[in-house]
């Protein structure tokens, strides 16, 4: 009968390069770490993560017994992988759930698992692959499985091909996802208002960050190119709010800042053009980034139909615009 564990390794093997860098995102007792270290050989590198000291101790012992020296054992959450791994990786393994033989109440959690998966796709080299094994036998495992499937469904099939392997008449048995990166295709670049990514660049020194799960869905599909046209135009943060009045941009104080707004728009266009962005996701209602509506120039919180200065310039240069209310129209 089928042994999914054997299939996992068979599917991952062709992606692992001798001398390459790989990550074990869930070290546990170190069996996958050991296998990965043997697969990349002494000239390769393995980074292995766990949040439990016992996992590191057990793995260290196993590696020493096998005279393995190419592994970095890291006591930290896999969601922080980018703080430790700078190279592109050819493979990554997630074996979710709890430490076998350990405390069953300490399991992987969807909040950090999803962040780690998104970061893993960003680290993945051309031709590389990730393997994510899910254990639906416990409550968090079922939640993780459903959310991972939803997240992976946002990947662009030409860039990251995501498959699922499951025994259909054994719903509690472990199953796994395989995420394979194309040999040639990179993610599409998407321009985005920096404040939507949580950058505190708005006039009041605050951000207007999208929800974390939405940002993860954007990151798994696109390489995000953040821009803040008002900062690019040389305006300070915080700054007095401005509105478009006829063909000028005026601060509430009466100061004419049309030049700064125009410079910011030009700079934003340069950055998006250099990055070959064909689309931009922009913050609605802003005098720079508004795509459908802006404040009407009376400083009385009334909106009118129209575009911000940057949005207009981007559209004139054939960049398709989307507001934060149209995120799910983006891939189409
Ligand atoms: C099913 S075990 C992994 C088994 C392991 N691959 C092996 O070969 O023995 C899952 C491991 O993930 C660890 N874990 C839980 N949350 C984590 C996190 N945020 N970052 C890294 N590891 C985590 C757990 O402590 C546990 O040891
Ligand atoms: S200019 Fe655009 S990116 Fe910058 S704070 Fe305003 S809406 Fe956000």
Image (cartoon, helix red, strand yellow):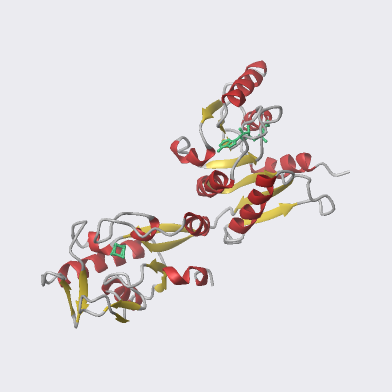
126 in relation to 278, above or below: above
Q: Quadrant of the N terminus?
A: top right
- Residue 7: percent from left, percent from top: 77, 43
Residue 213 located left or right of residue 127: left
User: Looking at the image, is 144 positioned above or below residue 292?
Assistant: above
178, above or below 6, in the image: below
Q: Position of residue 69 (x, y in %)?
A: 57, 21
Name the residue located 60 percent from the left edge and 23 percent from the top edge: 54
Residue at horizontal 57 percent and vertical 61 percent from the top: 154
Instruction: State the image coordinates of residue 105 (x, y, percent, origin top left).
Output: 64, 35
Vertical position of residue 107 compared to residue 58: above or below? below
Dividing the picture into quadrants, the one containing residue 49 is top right
Q: Tell me which corner region of the image, top left, top right, bottom left or bottom right, holds residue 317.
A: bottom left
Foreground residue among 157 and 176: 176
Q: Quadrant of ligand 2?
A: bottom left
* Horizontal and vertical percent position of residue 301: 26, 75
The image quarter containing residue 89 is top right
Of all residues, the one furthest to the right in this rendering is 1
- Tell me how many marks there are: 0
């Amino acid at each position: 009968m089928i042994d999914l564990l054997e299939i996992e390794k068979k599917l991952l093997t062709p992606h692992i390069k001798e001398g390459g860098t790989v990550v074990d995102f869930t070290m546990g007792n170190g069996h996958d770490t050991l296998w990965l270290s043997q697969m990349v050989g002494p000239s390769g590198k393995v980074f292995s993560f766990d949040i439990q000291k016992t996992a590191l101790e057990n793995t260290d012992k196993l590696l020493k017994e096998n005279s393995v020296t190419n592994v970095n054992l890291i006591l930290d959450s896999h969601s922080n992988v980018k703080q430790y791994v700078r190279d592109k990786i050819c493979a990554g393994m997630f074996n979710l759930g709890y430490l076998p033989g350990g405390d069953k109440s300490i399991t992987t959690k969807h909040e950090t698992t999803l962040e780690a998966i998104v970061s893993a796709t960003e680290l993945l080299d051309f031709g590389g692959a990730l393997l994510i094994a899910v254990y639906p036998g416990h409550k968090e495992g079922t939640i993780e499985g459903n959310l991972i499937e939803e997240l992976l469904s946002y990947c662009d099939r030409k860039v990251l091909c995501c498959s699922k392997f499951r025994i259909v008449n054994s719903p509690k048995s472990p199953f796994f996802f395989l995420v394979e990166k194309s040999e040639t295709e990179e993610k599409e670049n998407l321009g985005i208002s920096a404040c939507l990514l949580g950058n505190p660049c708005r006039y009041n020194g605050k951000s207007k960050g999208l929800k974390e799960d939405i940002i993860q869905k954007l990151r798994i599909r696109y390489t995000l190119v953040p821009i803040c046209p008002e900062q690019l135009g040389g305006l300070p943060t915080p700054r007095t709010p401005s509105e478009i009045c006829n063909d000028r941009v005026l601060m509430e104080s009466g100061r004419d800042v049309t030049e700064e707004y125009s410079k910011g728009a030009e700079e934003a266009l340069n950055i998006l053009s250099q990055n070959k962005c064909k689309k931009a996701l922009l913050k609605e209602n802003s005098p720079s980034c508004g795509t459908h509506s802006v404040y009407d120039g009376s400083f009385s919180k009334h909106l009118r139909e129209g575009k911000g200065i940057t949005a207009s310039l981007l559209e004139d240069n054939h960049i398709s615009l989307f507001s934060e209310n149209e995120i799910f129209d983006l891939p189409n």
